[in-house]
Amino acid sequence: MLTRLTSFTTLGINAIPVDVEVGVLSTSVDGKFTIGGLGDTAVQESRQRVIMALKASGYRTPMGRITNVNLAPANIRKTGSRFDLPIALGIIISNDTTDISADTLMDTAFIGELAFDGSLRHVTGVLACALACKRLGIHSIVVPTVNAPEAALVPGLRVIAAESLCDVVSYLTGEAEPPVIDAPAAAPSSSTQIDFADVRGQAMAKRALEIAAAGGHNVLLSGTPGSGKTLLAHAMRGILPPLTQDESLEVTGIYSVANLLPAGTPLITERPIRTVHHTASGVAIVGGGQHPMPGEISLAHRGILFLDELAEFPAQVLEVLRQPLEDRRITINRAQGTVTFPADFSLVAAMNPPQFSSATAERMKRRISAPLLDRIDLTIDVQPVEIADLQKKRDASAETSASIRKRVIGARERQTRRLKGRGISTNKEMNVRDLEELCPLDQQCAALLRQAADRLGFSARSYHRTIKVARTIADLAGSDALSVQHIAEALQYRQSVGV
């Protein structure tokens, strides 16, 4: 008897439907249990888990019969242990040991790893699978109980949460009713935010980070060790606008596939910040591997990628950032296919100012290329804070992150209205045509910008990025038109770092 069930494999952050075809034949010789369809080691090891789970659950095992499993389409590599559950169900149904409606199988997807005792264990990428169900018109999905809140994030999808293989059979035969799984409420914030009011001094750096948060721009903080660069970078997270529902699903999907979704947090509602050490490899940063997985730039999607000690990163590692900084995504080519991961992040980099010796300057130039620096919108010289200022108590009049965040949200709302219908939502995403249509320069602004570009040797990219920063400054001020003051302030943030 042939049984067909629907499951999914993941490629990048997307789920691809897989037909799990199970055929069981009686034989007078020793039986065989084969799994075909280009499965990895975890898929092949499913045989041991399925046999033990069937035996522990009181069902007939494949021993003494020929059991063939095909995971179609055969040209797509299958990874992970998520096929345990549909394979076991296929064997049970093919052995005629239960009465499960064919209509139920056609309208339901199954994913789950089996333990030897028949219980269901956590699997990765459940949100991607649930979204694929919605897209394909599949109305129900069976998942391990621990994954149910994640699947329930997709509206209109019936989520059947099961603790064990026996529970799944009982639910499908109608012997028991599955528990109702409601969409989870947003989890309360669990991170400790650094408030800007607690950061002494650094008025210009705070202003630059406010502009960066409002427009999604990239920032470089240059200053002596201990001047507060890392503190400022982490404080920036507290002034970013909250994630929208769609953005939360995007970020959650990435973390689900990467198996980094925090326990008890089915939906990520806070913008991520990823701090990367200078020993990280290029693959760790942009993603990849034999089975491509998201890297740090994708884990920082919709949030902040913080590179401390920028000058200590190998040049080849920094150069891989150039393309995703422009395109806001990274495409990885492997033998099994091409995978594209989202990478729309704000880069915040920190470095110590170069010592003006020929050897040091030359080393920095080799590591931090001009094209990479060209992609940084705001460069700030972070000066050390006086000890006397550190010893002062917190000023009651100091501006808090909450008040700055209100301005940032207001600026983002202005951008959303202005950019409606263009497929973008922040100033950093504007192309040349957008700038010409939405950011016209009067004679004074054009003259100032031309003079500065000639004196500082701007490239075309630097010229356009300066206009984008000026547009964000105008949004923070609530201005519809660019003025000389906005251009002048934007030019202040294109300082040289001596490399």
Image (cartoon, rainbow, N blue to C red):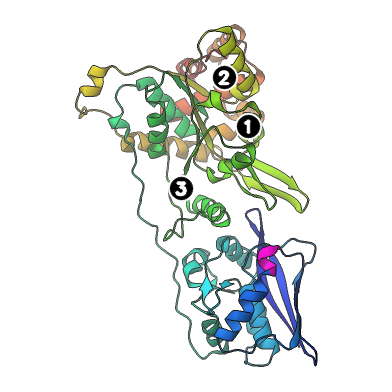
Q: Earlier in the sequence, mark 2 or mark 3?
A: 3
Q: Which residue is mark 2?
A: 441
Q: Which residue is mark 3?
A: 243
Classify mark 3: residues with Cα within 10 Å, few (<14), some (14-19) or many (20+): some
Depth check: give the residue in front, 335 or 63. Answer: 63
Instruction: Answer with the quarter of the image where residue 363 lies.
Output: top right
Q: Are marks 1 and 2 in contact (CB under 8 Å)?
A: no
Q: Position of residue 166 (x, y in %)?
A: 53, 84
Q: Earlier in the sequence, mark 3 or mark 1?
A: 3
| Left or right of residue 198, residue 462 in this image | right
- Label 2 – label 3 distance at C-alpha: 32 Å
Task: Inspect the image, locate mark 1, and give the three-letter code of the amino acid beneath it.
Answer: Val
| Left or right of residue 473, residue 75 in this image | right
Magenta part of the chain? 40-44
Residue 117 sits above or below residue 328 on the image: below
Residue 202 forms part of the magenta stretch = no
